[in-house]
Image (tube, grey):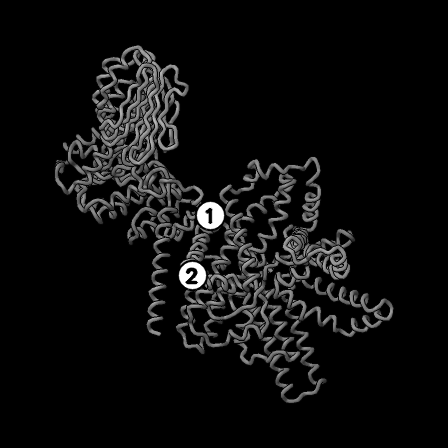
Amino acid sequence: MKKKYLFKVIDLSVLALVVVLMFLYLFRVLGFSDNTHSKAVFQQLYDLPENIVDVAWLGPSSVQEYIIPSQIYEYTGITVYPLALGSVPFDSTELLIKEMEKTQDPKVYLIDIRDLAFSSLSDPSIRRVTDNMAMSENRTAMIDQLTSDWQEFLPVSKFNKLDYYFSFPKYHSRWQELEKADFVDDDEVYLGYWIGKEVRVFDKDEVLARMDAEEVEIPAENLVFLNRFLDFCDSFGKRVVFTHTPHCLDEEKFGQYNLIMRLIRERGYEVWDMNESVDEIGLDYQTDFQGPLHTNVWGSKKVTDYVSRCLVNFFHLPNHRGDPEYADYEEYVTRFNRALDEYELTQITDFETYLEKLVSMKEGCNIYIATYGIQGYGLSNQHASTLKQLGLNQVDALTQPEYRSYAAIISDGNVLHEKLGEGTSDTVIETYVDNTKVSLSSANWKGFYGCSIRLGVTERSQKENGFNIVVTDKETGEIIDTVAFDTKDEACTCIRFVTFEN
Amino acid sequence: MTITSLNFFIFLILCVTVYYILPKSFQWVELLLFSLVFYYFAATPLTFGYVALSSFMAWGVTNGMERDRKKGAKASDMKAWKILMVISFIINICLWFRLKGRAFLSSTLWGINQIFPSVKTVELPEIVAALGMSYYTLQIISYTLDCYWENAKPQKNPLKLLLFSCFFPQMITGPISRYDQLQSLYEKHSCSYKNLAHGVQRILWGLFKKIVIAEKCGVIVDAIWADFTLYRGAYIWIAFLLYPIQLYSDFSGCMDIVIGVAELFDIKLVENFKNPFFSQTSQEFWQRWHITLGTWAKDYILYPVLKSKGLQSLNKKLKQKCGKKAAKIITTALGMAVLWFVLGVWHGAFKHIIGVSLWYWIILMLEDIFKPYSEKINKKFGFKTDEFGWKFFRAARTYLTYSFGIVFFRAKDVPQAFRFLKELFLSFTKSRWNPWVLFDGSILNLGITYKELNVIFIAILALLAVGVLREKYGYARNWLDTQPVLFRRTIYLALLFAVVILGAYGPGYQSSAFIYGQF
């Protein structure tokens, strides 16, 4: 009887454990999700070793999309962590500092003022914080604060606390929208930063002229939140500096920021107005913004470079490079640089530059090349020389204006296959690379199919004249780029007609 | 607090925990207290007075009768109690009419106004009715009559009788239990794994029916019913054929939850559904659909009416004039007319008298009249009535008959029902012919995605599979209990996660109340 009872208890415990584990997984997959990578911002902070962050930078996307912490670390050895989320309400700042203080002990806090000129509280802006924070008293306090702070400022109370404590009921119906990103770790975030790729053009003079705008009132709730936060800073005991990152907003907003900065300065705090330093930063308003609110990766690199110099000059923080305790930051330097390389590769349209980039990032990549037609009109000796740096030895023959087929596979910097067609014959390579079946075919002018690079069952090449190149990540197999340079023509025109979703 | 809400399940866990912790002799007291708490949160607390009034009247009348009976009172002395009993019924019915009959009165007046325009229609003020009033009123009447007919012994403790009337799981949509069927309320129960497991399984299955099938079907049906000048032709047929499934999943899903909740306390409630869409005839359908209401109506309306002196003497006269068969048909028709009229009134609107009552009265009478002829035809032509094809045809016919009747149930009023039926019959005309909407993606305009359509399709298949198992094994779980533990657990986990993931619930989602919760 006792045995039977024991067996039942064990049986039920196992069942309960399975159910709990399944639910935990479900909560993770079907939880809050958006394209601002807020989950990773918290997760990467929690994953860092304790007490390694020198500077914490809090704010909305005006921090998240401006500052590349791995680059600051690479340049200065200073560890910065931007605990910044899209449209994060300013009144969450104090509790976010407490969250940061749980595992880190930053010497300096930078607080961006961007959100103070905006008056809105949306469900996603709350959830980016509350749904991603670890379960704790602080999270409960954050839910309480964000749902109650705004009660007196909103016409109708639309936020129910209970919905934020248990967010699953709201998001369970997301099962229809699930995609790969919901099941795997977010690897597009580098210490809170993610690469912004869009480009929007602004008139620099016009934007900068708005800086002298008259002060404009800010939303009443933000004034309350600002004063409350400044009171907190008075008793906090750590150095707090406010920042105003560059933007292209309208005159009214500039007027509001002018007021905010004056109020903060009157309370004895520094404000770092980077809009005043855009020349020093080197921001190009033709290429460096992705919208009025955010810089793109090129702009972010410049802002980050400027910030790095300021951190060294103003705060005298130590250089941690080479210290094994900071291996995480070292890893993010490698990861971010790699991601940037991959992104830059997809933007290059000059053949020689492209080949040089390939040479610099050949490790960790699989490169597939198949040609079609005569290459010699466009393929110069210089090109051939750079191709040789990839380990390709038979490319000299292609510089002649003759019909020759050619295909090659380079994996992790090593040439696995290189085949030059005899006379006017076609070239075919069929093999396995990293357990994936690969078929390359290259044809001369007689070849009916032109050229082909088939990975698995899918055609990945542009199937164009000249050099067709497909670059994939060796580890994940994901396509980094697929391009053709028309070396049948002297101009070596770059062709990216087809892009592939991984 | 609805019985699909998180609050209800927290309340339930608390109630079950306290129930098994308490000494067994207090278990019924705990159920009564928790029923009061449920009433407080789920309804207007003051309306609980109506339940209490009904229960205490029944307690007084039945115990008074019993006391005099024990004293050996004569039949003439019992007359006073009989009058009091009738008065208590009248009070109950008047209370019900005052609180729930508003829609019935105004819609009936509207109906009369259509025939006699001199009769004016009125809009009556809305009064908050007691939760589950239609259900407990019938329970109290049946209890009183059972005691009067000496089929049951009166309950001495008025609070125990109150528990019989307001046991919280059955306050939303029944079932309408007879007093002798709920004796387990007062028994002492031990906590057992089997009861808890069976209860949870049943609740899960009920939730699956309600928040996965019924709610998703409801999106389609509601969209079409909202504007059938916009949605015509094939759309009308979709709504026509899907609504019975929605209604069944909704109502029987609620019953599964209610029965499952009661099982957690080791209390067995009577079943209210038994695969109604497997019925071969409409008569059989009503023995499988809302069983407790049908049984109640038969026991307390049809049989007393058929046994009444007036109808007995009419039967005699008709036998002499028209023969035995015709007399039986006519008297049964009259009895059934009374039964269906009362059921129509109980459902609370004129449209129910037309749609449910009149329609089914005609159908059932026709079935009765033509039954011998159809049997003869089957025999003559050698139709194999045991074959699947034949059974399927008859089940489909019963389904269509039901679908037709409940157009009135779904409609806002009688004119809307007729407009719908008109569209249904005209859907094959040139101007409305549009079967391509089933294939070209137009159906997605109804507020549902392809993925959800797939879910509906698979869920209905699951419903069908469970129905087949139920036909064969009594309960699907009887079959499942014979399967290996891993398979069993997988099925239950799949059910749990289907409910959790696919169910329609959560903030921003307004779950419609149970369709039968309105009665």
| Residue pictured at 32% horizontal, 37% vertical | A115
Q: Is residue A381 left or right of residue B335?
A: left
- Say if B465 sits above or below B57 in the image: above
Name which quarter of the figure residue B179 lies in: bottom right
Please state the chain letter of the residue tagged with numbered disc 1 in the rendered image: B
Residue pushed farthest bottom?
A: B71
Camera-near label (2 vs 1) is 2
Q: Position of residue B264 (x, y in %)?
A: 46, 67
Q: Position of residue B493 (x, y in %)?
A: 42, 56
- Mark 1 secondary-structure assignment: loop
Q: Position of residue A15 (x, y in %)?
A: 37, 60
Which three-letter amino acid code belongs to the residue tagged 1?
Answer: Gly
Residue at mark 1: B508
Name which quarter of the figure residue A405 lies in: top left
- Mark 2 secondary-structure assignment: loop
Residue at mark 2: B484
| Residue A26: mark in rendering | none
